[in-house]
Image: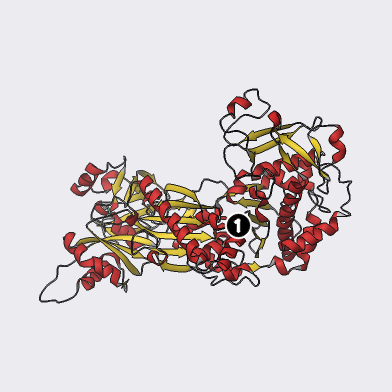
Amino acid sequence: MAVTTTDALVVFTPSGRRGRFPVGTPLLQAARSLGVDIDSVCGGRGMCGRCQVVLAEGEFAKHGVTSRSTNLSPLGPVEREFARGHPLAPGRRLSCSTQVLGDVVVDVPQDSQVHRQVVRKSAEAHDIELDPVVRLHYVEVQLPDMHDPSGDLRRLEDALEFEWRLTELACDVRVLQQLQPALRRGGWKVTVAVHGGSQIIAVWPGFRQRVYGIAVDVGSTTIAAHLCDLSSGEVIAAAGAMNPQIRFGEDLMSRVSYVMMHHGGDKEMTDAVRAAINDLVTDVARQAGIVREEILEATFVGNPIMHHLLLGISPVELGGAPFALSTDASLTLWATEIDLAIHRNARIYVLPCIAGHVGADAAGVVLAERPDLSEEVTLLVDVGTNAEIVLGDHRRLLACSSPTGPAFEGAQISCGQRAAPGAIERVRIDRETLEPRVKVIGCDLWSDDPHFAAATAAIGVTGICGSGIIEVIAELYLAGVIRHDGVIDGSLAERSARIRADGRTFAYDLHGGADGRAPLSITQNDVRAIQLAKAALYAGVRLLMERMHVDRVDRIRLAGAFGSHIDVKYAMVLGMIPDCALGSVSSAGNAAGTGARIALLDQRSRRVIEQLVRRVEKIETAIEPRFQEFFVEAMAIPHLTAPFPRLREAVPLPEAGTAMAGSGRRARSAARRKA
Ligand code: FES
């Protein structure tokens, strides 16, 4: 651009982009020509307020600019009109309605940038880059003219090209059915939703500036939904519900069996899960004060069986070797194809699956955690009835699933229960007296507090949930009640009445037992169930470590509800996870759901996860002979041979002393059964 006396230098921060423009150029136009990232829905008409900027006043030696407020046009009628409805914060200007009069430095705040960062709460998590796949564009369309007999769509496309440089847009009959009424009701002014910069998916009369999306994690036990404002990336409502498929089977394999044994069982389960998701949609929309039709995009994650049932695909092939997925690719569909009650032209995106047992939920965890960006060897574990395990760093990513069964969720444990008020979730055992203290969900007091009985009178002490089971078995091991090989040491019955004979083995009475009621006890079978589950998990991890040629991991992230509630110290004492500095083991929260949210808010992340999934090396534990060996060694607490040096620095472990002889054969046959 030639420099004239009527040119002014404009520097945009934080991008640092700069250029000279004729006096009178609107700031938004200057920004656009420099490729500066400034949002807009209304196309510079002073309606949306998305294009706000702040003048940086003062001497900027670095830029060679003295930036003064007089170098911008004063507040004009458009800004004053806008500010009447939406007061502008001090110093803020609408860049579309502010002209350059002299040299200026102009800051584009985060909330005015299209590709802003959505900050995630966890310090260990990467922020989400906002780049939603659905964008809104307001346009004014030429009226039809007898002398220019073009269709309404042609003139809408012309307006979108002229104002927004959008070309070659697809538009199907669903939109055409809305188009003519919308144009006429809006007086030829409409807001258009464009998907992926290539397809018109909705047209509304007049100006509209908000559009919403929903991210759904379909778990086998619970379904979680997050409603997001696609323009800000904020979660504006969230809801969760039990997966109603539970009535067809608690765990995944029993649901597959139901399909095998009941004609039409897959349709029943598909209908049930879709109905539950639609209830959640209604719930989050109500919480946010919007209608469901304002939701234009949805993303889904789920394990392979949930994934297939959601899509109306029979999961029968996933019930046995070779565990063939119908497809491992990501899917983009119309919401109506899965009966999702949101805008009728909304699209849904289902993340890709990794393998027959490692689903789109694990892909979500990978997207949320991005182990591929780290030099550290990171272990990601999502514990459910199947543990999905990913290990890797910037060089390699490996994944497998391990058949942990439902013991960690309280099933298969004599007094186990779901995490609910009244469930024991914390346990401490005195090393001398072997007396326990417990805490239950719904009460902040420990059981040795004199007010505990009164505080829990209403909810009761009803059972032990997953985190409680991990703690009680680990504490019993640390107190010497459970030996290295997992046997409850009956000789201690002399020291404590809590240890008592239970058939040919022994049990430990953890709580209650007064008034003739049976106590909540830990039996030898309970310990065995946890040993089998934790050995399966550890063996899966060990298999991946061997394939990756590493003998230690630098970081462990535990995903899912279970990972949020367990005390990682006890998980390591039990040997569920490999040795690692305790400070480097943390909960990743609902990482699968976060992955769905990232895919919702950042369209580029979809290509990222599609490529990452292709890079993942899939290991099938069922056919790996080494899995059996690792499983047997992992039956001991914490492990038969692994020394756990970093754990020992934090927690003094009892000396092993007890050989695994005798239990090795049992463990081997158990390993074969589980695998
Ligand atoms: S672009 Fe909409 S108010 Fe400026």
Q: How many numbered marks, from 0 up?
A: 1
Tell me the residue at 62%/54% (across/down): 384
325 lies above or below 393: below
- Residue, far front: 516
Residue 21 figure quarter: bottom left
671 lies above or below 517: below
Q: Secondary structure at mark 1?
A: loop
Indicate the quadrant containing the C terminus: top left, top right, bottom left or bottom right. Answer: bottom right
Residue 488 figure quarter: top right
- Residue, far left: 146
Find residue 557 and report its horizontal and vertical position in percent: 63, 51
Find residue 512 and report its horizontal and vertical position in percent: 69, 32
Which one is in front, 249 or 219?
249
- Position of residue 197 in the picture relative to residue 665 (left or right): left
For disc 1, the marked residue is 251
* Residue 630 seen in render: no
